Image (cartoon, rainbow, N blue to C red):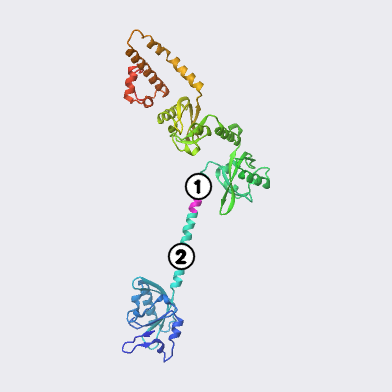
Amino acid sequence: MTEQIPGSETLKIGELPAGLNVESLIEQASDIAILVGKNGMVEGITVNPDCPSLGCLDHWVGRTFDSFLTIESREKYAARIKAITADPGMVPRPLQLNHVDNAVWEFPVRYTVHRVKDRPSFLLFGRDMQPIAEVQQHLVAEQTARERDQQKIRSYETFYRVVLEASETPLMLVESETGRIRDVNSAAAALFGTKLETLAGSSLPQALEGQRKAELMESLHAAASAEELKVIEVIARRSGRDLALFAQYFRAAGELFLICRVASIDDSSATGPEVAQSLATLFNSASDAIVMTDAKGVIRDANEAFLILTDAAQIRDVKNKSLGEFLARGDVDLKIILETTIKTGRVRSYATQVLSSVGTRANVDVASTRLQRRGGDLGFGLIIRDVTPSEVANASAGASVMSDEAMKSVMDLVGTASLKSLVSATSDVVEKMCIETAVKMTGNNRVAAAEMLGLSRQSLYVKLRKHGLLKGEPGED
């Protein structure tokens, strides 16, 4: 390191103390050493070769030292120089300054400031703090990342707790090895006749009457491993209620747990697991097609008979599709069925045709009902019965009997009118029969009847008036 003293030649710092060579000592004792004159000019500087991160700082010589400091560090440096000047015997204390160079380079250095004897200069010995600062930055970044992860975990835990508590289904999470209840919702705690805080963390066998841990856990594992739904009937110790447990496996963080759905066995209300299993078997094995839809007629579930009727390969071929896509008159049929069901609560019989995926048609009779539960509307349940040929023949015979009187009126005209007049009269009779049938099928809903006949609403009113089917002026349906 070299220093520049006004009016003298350039000297080496190592030559300052009476010929003693301390340059190597200074380089080893500090990462950077700076000689600053009284006017604050950098008169000399040396950088430890083992600190390449500092680079070459020879361009500092001849410029003010504080021009390479941040604003905060300038104030700290000025205060320290003032204190040393006022008290020459002051013990040097570390001073951390942040340097800036070329407007983009900023690095911290910890200095000790020493006053040079018999000279108006200061010698600064510095230790590069940049490696420590980088470690601190990494630590801060890691801490920030951990805080973000903890916030995510807390949010996920909140979501999990809200969903668990909002579920109307009584649920509990059980450790598969120990049988300890890891978590439970309020609905399940109510069935056990205890508080949620008391039940969570306790042993499941202890919450049940007459259950040994080994036997109960063996039964739960067997039920969770079975391909078919198995029920474990138990008695709650506190409430004395007969309960049914339905167990399933799930894995979390490498550990195996059991999620148990709890149900109350109540034969009087027909909500026990045996009844539920029987209803499920009836739904899947019924010879008539059974379809469950939402409030708009979109299929949510259907049994095997409906898949056969529509030539569908699997349930996903019909699920989430409108039932109207499988009816002969499409949305007209669907609208009539749903609106009539809403008005009357059920439809006993509605004749139409079902279209299969390959274009074939089958005559069917549809019965529907509105499915409701406490607090909401589930949609509709429909039973679609394939009408046999004999039933079709009987229905056709019934239709001919119903129209005998009208046909007799036409036949009485034979011999008294031309063929053209007879055909015209017959057309009017057939037209009247079709309109009467459509109005009857739609429950006197003239908008739906017009859609079924392919007429505009105004045209339907004209024909109703023509055939004397209006008892008064047409009104809104």
- Near-viewer residue (25 or 89): 25
Q: Quadrant of the C terminus?
A: top left
The quadrant in which residue 51 appears is bottom left
- Secondary structure beneath disc 1? helix
Q: Indicate the position of residue 104 as horizontal and vertical percent values.
A: 35, 70
Q: Residue at x 46, y 32 (%)?
A: 356
Position of 326 relative to 237 (above/below): above
Query: How many numbered marks have been drawn onto this rendered protein structure?
Result: 2
Callout 2, which amino acid? Val
Q: Quadrant of the N terminus?
A: bottom left
Q: Indicate the position of residue 281 as horizontal and vertical percent values.
A: 58, 34
- Secondary structure beneath disc 2? helix
Classify 10 Å Cα crowding around label 2: few (below 14), some (14-19), many (20 and above): few
Classify 10 Å Cα crowding around label 1: few (below 14), some (14-19), many (20 and above): few
Callout 1, which amino acid? Val
- Near-viewer residue (331 or 477): 331
The residue under label 1 is 162
Q: Indicate the position of residue 452 as horizontal and vertical percent values.
A: 38, 26
State yes or no: discs 1 and 2 in contact (Cβ < 8 Å): no
Numbered label attached to residue 140: 2
Does 157 appear in magenta?
yes
Relative to 307, is 267 on the left or the right?
A: right
Q: Which residues are magenta?
A: 154-163
Kindly report the distance in space between the C-alpha atoms of the residues bearing marks 1 and 2: 33 Å
- Near-viewer residue (62 or 39): 62
Does 385 appear in magenta?
no
Label 1 vs 2, first from the N-terminus: 2
Position of 382 relative to 123 (above/below): above
